[in-house]
C-alpha cells in the first residue's frame, strides 16, 4: 500500500460545499461552454448561435440570482452588468439581448 493517498480519498464526503463554492462551480460550468470569440452579427438563427445565446442567458440568470449572496445591490448590479456587457459583444443585434438590457437598466434604476 502506498504512503501517498490521493486528495479525493482524504476529503470527507459529508462536508458540505459552501454556497459561494457552489455558485463558482456552476458559473465555471456555464462559462467553459461559451465561445468568447463570436462577434456581434445580425441574427442568423443557426444552431450554434442559439446554443451560445442560451449559454449567455443561463450565465446572466445565475448572476442575477445573486449566488454569492452580496448584500450590496450596487456590487450585484456591477457583477450583472459586467456579464451583460460581455454578452452584448456577441449578441448586440438580438432582440432578446436588447429586451433584457432594458429590463436590467430599469431594475437598477437607470
Image: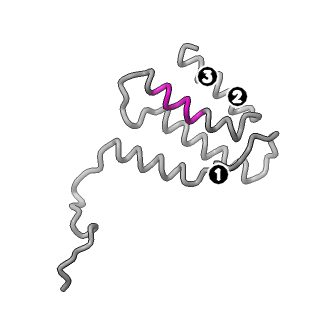
The part of the image, by quadrant, that contains residue 10 is bottom left
Q: Residue at x 43, y 25 (%)?
A: 75
Label 2 to label 3: alpha-carbon separation: 9 Å
Are the two marked residues, 2 and 3, in contact with CB atoms closer than 8 angstroms? no
Q: Is residue 39 left or right of residue 80?
A: right
Q: Which residue corresponds to mark 1?
A: 35
Q: State the image quarter where residue 11 is shown.
A: bottom left
Let me know if residue 81 is in the magenta part.
yes
Counting residues from the start of the chain, the first of labels 1 and 2 encountered is 1
- Say which quadrant the C terminus sits in: top right
- How packed mark 3 is, by other alpha carbons closer than 10 Å (few <14, some 14-19, many 20 or more), is few
Q: Which residue is mark 3?
A: 103
Residue 26 picture location, percent across and down: 45, 48
Specify the segment rendered in magenta.
Answer: 76-84
Return the disc, 3 or 1, that comes first in the chain's sequence: 1
The correct choice, above or below, for 76 with respect to 42 in the image is: above
Question: Which SS does the magenta portion mostly show?
Answer: helix
Work out how far the residue at label 1 is from the one at label 2, CA to CA, in angstroms: 20 Å
Pointer 2 or 3: first along the chain: 2
| Residue 16 disc label | none
Relative horizontal placement of residue 63, taking residue 1 as reference (left or right) = right
Amino acid at each position: 500500500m502506498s504512503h501517498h493517498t490521493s486528495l479525493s480519498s482524504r476529503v470527507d464526503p459529508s462536508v458540505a460545499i459552501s454556497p459561494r463554492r457552489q455558485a463558482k462551480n456552476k458559473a465555471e460550468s456555464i462559462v467553459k461552454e461559451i465561445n468568447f470569440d463570436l462577434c456581434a452579427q445580425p441574427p442568423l438563427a443557426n444552431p450554434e448561435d442559439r446554443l451560445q445565446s442560451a449559454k449567455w442567458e443561463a450565465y446572466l440568470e445565475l448572476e442575477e440570482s445573486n449566488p454569492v449572496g452580496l448584500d450590496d445591490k450596487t456590487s450585484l448590479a456591477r457583477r450583472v452588468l459586467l456579464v451583460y456587457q460581455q454578452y452584448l459583444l456577441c449578441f448586440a443585434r438580438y432582440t432578446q439581448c436588447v429586451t433584457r438590457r432594458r429590463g436590467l437598466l430599469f431594475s437598477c434604476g437607470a
